[in-house]
Amino acid sequence: MKFYSKENLDFLLYSVHRTQALCKYDRFKNHSRENFEMILDAAASLAENHLRPILSEMDRNPPQVVNDRIKVHPNMKALMRKFGEDGWISMSAPEKFGGQGIPFTISQIAGFIFAAANYSSMAYPGLTTGAAQLIESFGSEALQKTFVPKMYAGEWQGTMALTEPEAGSSLSDLKTSARAHADGHYRISGQKIFISCGDHDACENIIHLMLARIEGAPAGTKGISLFVVPQKRLDENGQLVWNDVNTAGMFHKMGYHGAPIAHLMMGEKGGLSWLPGRRASQRAQLHVSDDE
């Protein structure tokens, strides 16, 4: 099945960009061109056998809101687990996070192959990788342990929740607010629109990286902060409980109708959230009772 040109990819990777030269560095010394080619062949096999066959079906039967939750193509739950178990979500992550330390270039080419086969299905793991990497890079140890393993395993979805009804490219106009609490967490209130994979039933939890303004922060971009906002949070007993992040509706984006595009509302009580910056989140409690 011809949905991309391997010849063109090989030419760009090895003749133009000489990606194999990365293997001389300590960080990538355990890799080789042969290893890269094995990885990309495996990506092509997954794309051809699992992603491409459901492309038309996902496009013609887009996600639907049912009882205030978004239901997606039934294959996506198994696919997300496969993306996680086979290491596609975490392939560029360090070994301590379960990754393979693959060069970012190679992981991006694997992502391109998935997107060429079925862009809708690629959006789920692609967004999760980016969100997990941010928590991995800037989160406290507690945030890393709580969120990153489940995200890399394909059990929890990651998103970037930025856009609002009155703040698209002008994010400095956002109205979503964050109220600080003494134990280091924040309560988020507001709404977000056009959030890709912002709610669906293929994963048991959705982890939003959400922009909001802390109460009292200055206007404009300098007053904006980024928060980790789970759809469900862990209670004192380690059980997932609803975190007041609700689905108000859904959109369909041109080109990938098979991915759920959510309109999110953070209610009057406000969803619990945490700043990923290590200094800000080091003292933050991750298990907070509902009556605080």
Image (spheres, rainbow, N blue to C red):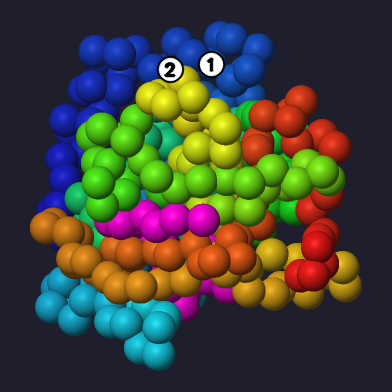
Tell me: residue 32, above or below residue 243.
Answer: above
Tell me: residue 21, above or below residue 194.
Answer: above
Please give left or right for residue 151 compared with residue 20 in the image: right
Q: Residue furthest bottom?
A: 67
Numbered badge on residue 23:
1
* Image quadrant in which the C terminus is located: bottom right
- Residue 182 x %, y %: 82, 43
Q: Quadrant of residue 251?
A: bottom left
**Kind of residue at badge 1:** Cys
From the viewer's side, name the closer residue of 105 and 190: 190
Q: Secondary structure at mark 1?
A: helix
Q: Secondary structure at mark 2?
A: helix
Report how far apart the C-alphas of labels 1 and 2 lie in the structure: 6 Å
- Residue 50 x %, y %: 33, 69
Q: Residues within 10 Å of mark 2 (few under 14, many from 20)?
A: some
- Residue 154 x %, y %: 56, 61
Q: Quadrant of residue 63?
A: bottom left
- Residue annotated with mark 2: 20
Q: Residue at x 57, y 32 (%)?
A: 216
From the viewer's side, name the closer residue of 8 and 85: 85
* Image quadrant in which the N terminus is located: bottom left
| Residues at circles 1 and 2 in contact by the CB criterion of under 8 Å | yes
The answer to whether residue 283 of the structure is visible from this angle is yes
Check residue 21 for magenta coloring.
no
Please give left or right for residue 74 compared with residue 138 in the image: left
From the viewer's side, name the closer residue of 2 and 272: 272
The answer to whether residue 158 of the structure is visible from this angle is no
**Kind of residue at badge 2:** Gln
From the viewer's side, name the closer residue of 22 and 168: 168
Q: Residue at x 45, y 11 (%)?
A: 21
Q: Which segment is the magenta one?
A: 189-206
